[in-house]
Each structure stands twice: as C-alpha cells, then as structure tokens.
Amino acid sequence: MITDQDKAVIAAILEEAHALLEEKIGAIRQDAAEAFQMKEDAEKPEAKISLSVKWPTEELKPELEVTLGWTISKKFTTTHVVDPTQTTIAFGD
C-alpha cells in the first residue's frame, strides 16, 4: 500500500527530475553533437541519462537529493561473416 508520504515523495522526485531534464536537455544534445563531430566515421552518438535519488526514508519530512548524469557514447560497427568451411586459396606466398 502506498502511503500519502510515499505519494508525496514520488511526486517530488518526478518534479525534480523533470526540472533537471528541462534544464539540461540542451547541454546533453550539444555534448552529443560535439562528440559526433570529433569522429567523422562514427555512427550516431547516443546519450545515456541516469537519474538517482537519495533520501532518508524514515523521516517525516525527508530532504530529497535528485541527481542527473549523462554520458555520450560513440559507436563504431563492422561486420564480418566467419565461415570455417570456406577454403582459402593462397596466391603467391
């Protein structure tokens, strides 16, 4: 059963997370664009956003600490089919 305090904590977490995302979404996109421009052969950059919440769960009026973090990853992909049944012909050692 969710108590009124739990509902209030959930609402506060969502409110703080929403505010952080609204404030930082432009910086996240810019970081991704800059990372992509540094490597011309990179595929689309991806942003990974993490959100963490810390609070004293047993306090009547807890103070929440909501943290937003992000990382930008660049991905490079190649493919290769391995066929061990294929015969290799060596041309001129």
Image (cartoon, rainbow, N blue to C red):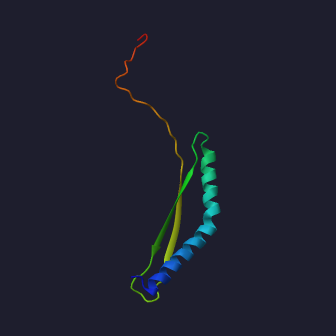
Position of residue 49 measured from the top left corner of the image (x, y, whole percent): 52, 61
Q: Residue 55: x percent and y percent? A: 44, 79
Taking the image as drawn, is residue 63 in sight? Answer: no
User: Which residue is most to the bottom?
Assistant: 60
Residue for point 43% across, 89% down: 60
Residue lying farthest left?
A: 85
Q: Name the residue rendered at 52%, 79% in the picture.
A: 11
Q: Looking at this view, is 53 or 4 the one in front? A: 4
Count how many numbered circles sit on residues in the image: 0
Q: Is residue 29 above or below residue 80?
A: below
When the figure is inspected, residue 40 is found, relative to residue 67, above or below; the finding is above
In the rendered structure, the answer to whether residue 87 lies left or right of residue 43 reads: left
Residue 40 occupies which quadrant of the picture? top right
Q: Residue at x 38, y 27 (%)?
A: 83
Q: Measured along the vertical axis of the image, is residue 73 above or below residue 93?
A: below
Q: Can you name the residue that lies furthest to the front here? A: 1
Can residue 20 be seen in this snapshot?
yes
| The N terminus - image quarter | bottom left
**Residue 20 image position (x, y, % from top left):** 58, 70
Tell me: residue 75, above or below residue 26: above
Q: Residue at x 61, y 55 (%)?
A: 31
Residue 62 relative to residue 83: left or right: right
Where does residue 2 sit, x and y in percent of width and height?
Answer: 42, 82
Q: Along the horizontal axis of the image, is 77 left or right of 38?
A: left
From the image, which quarter does the C terminus lie in? top left
